[in-house]
Amino acid sequence: MSYSSSILTAAAIAATSSILSACGGGSSGNTSDAAPPVSNNSSTTTTNSTNSTNSTNTGVNNNRLAAAIAAAKNTANTDPMCSTDKLGDFYWEIGNASDNAPIVSNSQGTGSVNSTSYFNIASASKWIFGAYVLEKKGIDQVRSSSSLKDGLRFMSGYTGFNEDACAGKLSITACYIAGMNGNTGQANPDTVDKFDYDSGHDQKLASVDLGLGNFTAAQLDTEYQNTIGLSKGFHMAALDPLMAGGMMGTATDYALFLKKIMKQELEIGRYLGDQAVCALPSSCPGKVVYSPIVLLNEPWTYSYNHWVESEKGNGSTDAYSSPGKWGFYPWISADKKYYGILSRHDKDAGAYGASVKCGRQIRKAFVNAL
């Protein structure tokens, strides 16, 4: 699959991002089939690789680290789940909290996607908003407020959000009203206390509980920068301030955010997986309305705007993550020693699941070789 047809210049993104990035929040409501804008800021046409083994890896035997790097690269190159025939061109990296450069990284395919390729990251936006809420309110208030706690775990009942209706709106509240078709006054009793992966939860929290209703996308960008130190490389789509899916950014930008979490410079870094709720219908019948994780059929759970991955269940945690609808997949390992990103853009259905399958194969190869 080639992405050449969907690559836009930075100027084109500025003109079109506001009307194309409405979808990607991952809700059960209507979403457009149009792909969000994507840009590659590099003219590289060959495969690129960057390896780094700096001070924070001194506790790992150099031979094992070299083996882990080789195993990760071999998996990306040979595992059928990572085939570029299936995924198209993509970029991936694995790093730690302290080193400036990734431990290992690579552009697969023709090299058209790299660390600075600028994408609509779709539902990877959720983790950012979750971090913001915890930073703004603090863990005690989040845990004690049913509105905040249930909103961040997608159990608030503010569901049925139509992401397409948010396109063209200037403020967070305008997006909220349009997405809920004006029905913003009360939660849906049929979905209260049930997991429902829907953008309405976050939009209501931002508009009502966080007092951001009158904020434009530009004002939200500044608020994120001032509150959680989010890189200025991130931007909310100007005419589509969708909290759960409207952010634009690069793998480099997102890596900086993940490192802040791992170093516990952000409150959410101390509470990954906190009060996670069941998100697979077969694991908790009657408690899930809609969950995209049925595609993988694994017993994942959901914490404060991020997933707790588990292939086997029974209390096990494989990683924390926030896959985006279009295939952007960021993760932090269960021991919080490593982060990873698989960056790509794919409008095909199930792109997020394909990225998860490849990304975790690379993660497993790396970790198992250490």
Image (cartoon, rainbow, N blue to C red):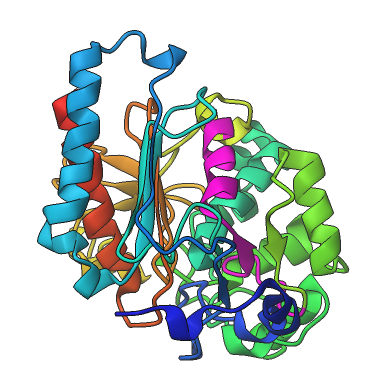
Look at 53% across and 64% down and name the residue there.
Answer: 43
Look at 60% across and 88% down and name the residue there.
Answer: 164
Residue 61's image quarter? top left
Q: Nearer the viewer, residue 177 or 230?
A: 230
Q: Nearer the viewer, residue 13 or 293?
A: 13
In percent of width and height, residue 140 lies at: 64, 32
Is 58 placed above or below 190 here?
Answer: above
The residue range painted magenta reads 239-260
In percent of width and height, residue 316 lies at: 21, 37
> Is residue 158 visible in this depiction of the protein?
no
Horizontal relation, residue 281 to residue 194: left or right: left
Is 186 placed above or below 233 here?
Answer: below
Is 10 placed above or below 20 here?
Answer: above
> Which quarter of the rendering shows the C terminus?
top left
In percent of width and height, residue 364 lies at: 19, 39
Q: Nearer the viewer, residue 152 or 38?
A: 38
> Which quarter of the rendering shows the N terminus?
bottom left
Horizontal relation, residue 360 to residue 244: left or right: left
Q: Is residue 247 magenta?
A: yes
